[in-house]
Image (cartoon, rainbow, N blue to C red):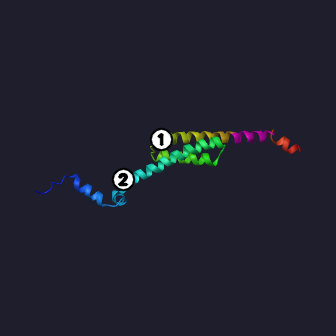
């Protein structure tokens, strides 16, 4: 009596005999989706961390810009960590807005002479 093969047996035997990385080459574009999702997840986490660290450390321009860009990229790539990406975008956006308001306030004070008067008087 010959053994009866089921439809799963040849696939299981083929997958058992292939090396670990060989299946990825045959999978095609479907294997690129988890890799892109991993990058989007990393972007969302990085955006959130940059937002928190920017507020705590007082970084006001370069880190929030980078965090804002990474958060937007994560949202556009369809991340699984959508909440972290949104928090990162909001934190970095608010910090950039506060930096812009502070710069405008300093420029306005300088323009009306409140800042310049003590410096020029000496």
**Front-lying residue, 112 or 121:** 121
Q: Which residue is mark 2?
A: 30
* Crowding at mark 2 (Cα within 10 Å: few <14, some 14-19, many 20+): few
Which numbered disc covers residue 82? 1
**Res 96 visible:** no
- In percent of width and height, residue 74 lies at 49, 46
The quarter of the picture where the N terminus appears is bottom left
| Residue occupying image coordinates x 47% and y 51% | 39
The quarter of the picture where the C terminus appears is top right
| Residue occupying image coordinates x 54% and y 39% | 87
- In percent of width and height, residue 50 lies at 58, 45
Question: Callout 1: helix, strand or loop?
Answer: helix
**Res 87 visible:** yes
User: As drawn, which residue projects farthest toward the front?
Assistant: 1
| Residue occupying image coordinates x 46% and y 48% | 77
Question: Callout 2: helix, strand or loop?
Answer: helix
> Dividing the picture into quarters, in which one does residue 25 lie?
bottom left
Q: Is residue 106 magenta?
A: yes
Q: Mark 1 near mark 2, Cβ–Cβ under 8 Å? A: no
> Dividing the picture into quarters, in which one does residue 58 lie?
top right
Q: Is residue 17 above or below residue 59?
A: below
Q: Position of 66 compared to 21: left or right?
A: right
Q: Is residue 109 above or below residue 34?
A: above
- In percent of width and height, residue 9 lies at 22, 54
Q: Position of 7 compared to 120: left or right?
A: left
Q: Which SS does the magenta portion mostly show?
A: helix
Q: Which residues are magenta?
A: 102-113
- In percent of width and height, residue 84 lies at 51, 41
Q: Is residue 1 above or below residue 103?
A: below
Which numbered disc covers residue 73? none
Q: Position of 3 compared to 110: left or right?
A: left
């Amino acid at each position: 009596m010959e053994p009866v093969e089921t439809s799963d047996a040849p696939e299981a035997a083929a997958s058992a005999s292939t090396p670990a990385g060989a299946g990825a080459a045959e999978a095609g574009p479907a294997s690129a989706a988890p890799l892109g999702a991993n990058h989007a997840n990393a972007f969302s986490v990085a955006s959130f961390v940059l937002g928190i660290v920017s507020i705590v450390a007082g970084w006001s321009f370069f880190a929030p810009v980078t965090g804002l860009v990474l958060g937007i990229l994560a949202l556009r790539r369809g991340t699984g960590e959508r909440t972290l990406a949104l928090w990162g975008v909001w934190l970095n956006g608010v910090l950039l807005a506060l930096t812009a308001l502070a710069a405008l306030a300093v420029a306005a004070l300088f323009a009306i002479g409140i800042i310049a008067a003590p410096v020029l008087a000496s």
